[in-house]
Each structure stands twice: as structure tokens, then as C-alpha cells.
Image (cartoon, helix red, strand yellow):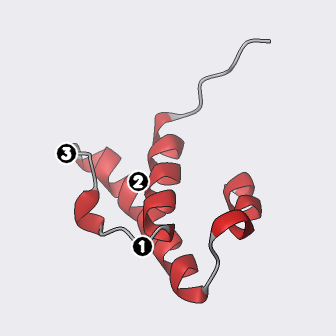
Amino acid sequence: MKKHKRDVSNRHFDRGYMAGNQGKSRDDCPHSQQNHREQWLAGWRDGRSDYWDGVTGSATLPRMLSI
């Protein structure tokens, strides 16, 4: 089966979510383009919120699948 490429903005959001959920700083954002950075930071904020609420590890899987 062929793998369909996902939307790039979803990928940036997902990676930002993972970084935020792992407790990393928002200064770790690897993107310099404004649009990509905004998507990464949106994911980071959601991930950080879940991190503070104690949702980590495999408990984040349902969250990631719904995005």
C-alpha cells in the first residue's frame, strides 16, 4: 500500500504537541517560517496543557489520533 503524505501543517502541529507534552521549551521550535512556527506552537500549547494535567505517555494516543 502507498502511504499518503499528510498535510505539512498537521505534521508540525503533531511534533509541537509531542515536544510540549515532553516538557520541552517553546524556544526549541525548529521552524523559522511564520506559518510553520504558528502550527508548531499551537501543538506545543496543547501538549503543554496536557503535560500540566498529567496526560503523558500512552495516554496521549487517543488525543493524537483525534487530531
Q: Position of residue 34 (x, y in %)?
A: 24, 49
x and y percent of residue 58 in the render?
Answer: 72, 64
| Left-right relation of 30 to 23 | left
In the rendered image, residue 11, in percent from the top left (x then y), is placed at 51, 42
For badge 1, the amino acid type reads Gly
- Distance, label 1 to label 2, CA atoms, is 18 Å
Tell me the residue that label 1 is attached to. 23
| Residue 20, quarter of the rendered image | bottom left
Q: Residue at x 73, y 59 (%)?
A: 61
Between discs 1 and 2, the one toward the N terminus? 1
**Up-down: is 54 above or below 14?**
below
Horizontal placement of 14 versus 31: left or right?
right
Q: Secondary structure at mark 3?
A: loop
Q: In the image, which disc is placed on residue 32?
A: 3
Residue assigned mark 2: 39
Q: Secondary structure at mark 2?
A: helix
Q: Residue furthest front?
A: 57
Quadrant of residue 57 within the rendered picture: bottom right
Extreme residue in the top direction: 1
- Disc 3 vs disc 1: which is toward the camera? 1
In the structure shown, which secondary structural element does the residue marked by tag 1 occupy?
Answer: loop
Q: Residue at x 80, y 12 (%)?
A: 1
* In the rendered image, the vertical position of residue 49 relative to residue 45, given as above or below: below
Q: Distance from label 3 to label 2 (Cα)?
A: 12 Å
